[in-house]
Image: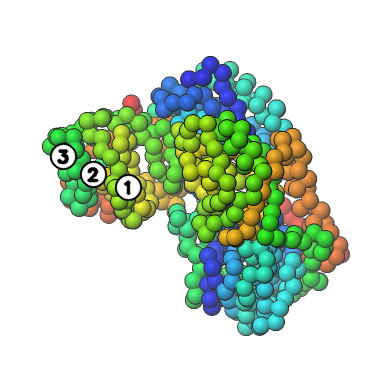
Amino acid sequence: MTIMKILKPGMYTTIQDIGRYNHQKSGMSVSGAMDQFSLRVANILVGNIDSEACLETMLFGLKIKFEGDALIAVTGGDLMPMINNKAIDMWSGVKVLDGDELSFGTVKNGCRSYIAIEHGIDVPEVMGSKSTYVKGKVGGFEGRMLKAGDEINIGSLDENNFNSIKKLPIELIPSYSKDNIVRVVMGPQEDYFTEDGINTFLDCAYEVTNEADRMGYRLSGTKISHKAFADIISDAVTMGSVQVPGDGAPIIMMADRQTTGGYTKIATIITPDINIVGQLKPGDSVRFKLIDIEEAHRIYRKYMKDFDEIRGCVAKLGCTTISGRKFKVRVNNKEYEVIVEEIK
Amino acid sequence: MYEEVKYLIAGDRAIVIEFGDEIEEQVNSKIRSLTVAIDQEGVIGINETIPTYRSLMVIYDPMIMELDELIGVIKSIITRMHELKLPEAKVIEIPTLYGGEYGPDIEYVADHNKISIDEVIKIHTEMEYLIYMIGFTPGFPYLGGMSDKIEAPRLQNPRTKIPVGSVGIAGKQTGIYPVESPGGWQLIGRTPVKLYDPYRKDPVLLNAGDYIKFVQIDESEFKNIEALELEGKYKVTVRKI
């Protein structure tokens, strides 16, 4: 077993997987990675199942020492990752050796980086997930953000099965910019808004304010007008819900959102584009583009199938495989046991 | 209650099935029936449901099910759900120590309503409160049915830290804080019972559709129950309605 020792905790560094499902009826937040594309690809690059837990860190400052060898991959926003002060490639497997230090500079683009480790992070699943929900003091490492001195068991480098490094083809690497467009479907409460209000929402650019965290992103910009009421009888909230309270400024609900809320929700961001939001930081801007639900589903299906293709094409590029390993895979919240056989 | 159920789109993986636009027991009981019915039917492609006051969010997998197909399945479940035998609602007793350092605002609530502290406790413990939904934080019950004789406005300056188990009043609502959090409710007491423990087999004690009844205890009973809870040995009293 290799140990990952936290020398500097960076900003809001937590352990996250794809999220804690099936407990929202009890008020449990889903949590999970803010940018699930980057999480999944990081896992694919080290040969894990897509849903394995990674470290999520933001903006700058994280520094980790490895005690033992490991295979890692860093994806997501570019926070200038280095090993022993030498820049490393992102979106690529990276071998680290006993005593190596992985550190991050400051953010060049995006907001959040993900660090996957071959064979994953050894923390217990709580309610079916390793994700940290800080407010509920649950999951991850002791239910909290990481701090200096923490020592976490992680998978070691599998030297016998190590063939070569996998890389994501360059054309598949997302580019993060200051100005963004995210696609939405209207609803569930679009009838609470005036026609003007809806037009404003779809025509104007909104800026991410300083109140932007794992729970939600408060935006500023042209006020969105309601017909009469901004409050509703509390109902369920989902990832990417765009709430508009009485002040007319939208709030995007993110991974650590509360399960229910009493504000009108004008629209919901489609799943693949929530990953864009997870990479926004204060000062960045976002525009909302309307699509219909049929198109949203076409996009969703392609997005999910793309992960299979990514898995296929990184395998062709690199071809690292692990022989005869058993995995537990969660698909649509049902668990399957899968055996992966070596191919050469 | 609406004459026709509404199906609202909430993104590419969820819909909201809305039965009405009021906080009302009959509407809420439809939500409970539908939640149980969907559970029992075990529809492949439905991943999770979130029941609230007057609607149910259904989270589905668009890789398995088209929206039209999903709505069709739910409509058919709704037409059949009256045949369903619902599990009987339970009453869960919540032992509560009122007043003193555990309920620093009870005097305010009494003065505000021009009654004595004992009367506040009597009225608060008389009712069986319906759990309309669980939300906001893990295990927080939204309760209905508090008497307007003990209502009180929220604090002007919310407290930054409210201890776990605090029982409070805000307007016409009463509730219990399952996790330490900031809040503006008037605190009238505290329960040693853990509503939320992520490391317990059932992390959340309460379920929507059941009822709770507050039962007054003294400080020594509070300490006893608290000690039992620490060892995971306390069992709440559960009765039929």
Q: Amino acid at mark 3?
A: Asp
Q: CA distance from mark 1 to mark 3?
A: 18 Å
Taking the image as shown, residue B111 lies to the left or right of residue A198, namely left
Q: Disc 1 is attached to a residue of which chain?
A: B
Q: Residues within 10 Å of mark 1 (few under 14, many from 20)?
A: some
Q: CA distance from mark 2 to mark 1?
A: 12 Å
B39 versus B165 height, above or below = above
Of A11 and B214, the residue lying toward us: A11
Residue at 72%, 52% in the rendered image: A338
Query: Which residue in the structure is indicated by mark 3?
Result: B111
Of A273 and B200, the residue lying toward us: A273
Query: Which residue in the structure is indicated by mark 1?
Result: B184
Where is residue A251 drawn, in percent x and y? 54, 47
Q: Amino acid at mark 1?
A: Gly
Quadrant location, the N terminus of chain A = bottom right
Discs 2, 3: same chain: yes
Tell me, yes or no, whether the two marked residues, 2 and 1, touch with CB atoms within 8 Å. Answer: no
Q: CA distance from mark 2 to mark 3?
A: 13 Å
Residue at 74%, 47% in the rendered image: A304
Query: Which residue in the structure is indicated by mark 2?
Result: B188
Front: mark 2 or 3: 3
Query: Which SS class for mark 3?
Result: helix
Taking the image as shown, residue A336 lies to the left or right of residue B112, namely right
Circle nearer the N terminus (2, 3): 3
- On residue B96, the disc is none
A121 versus A235 height, above or below = below
Q: Amino acid at mark 2?
A: Ile
Q: Tell me if I can see residue A147 in this picture.
A: yes
Discs 2, 1: same chain: yes
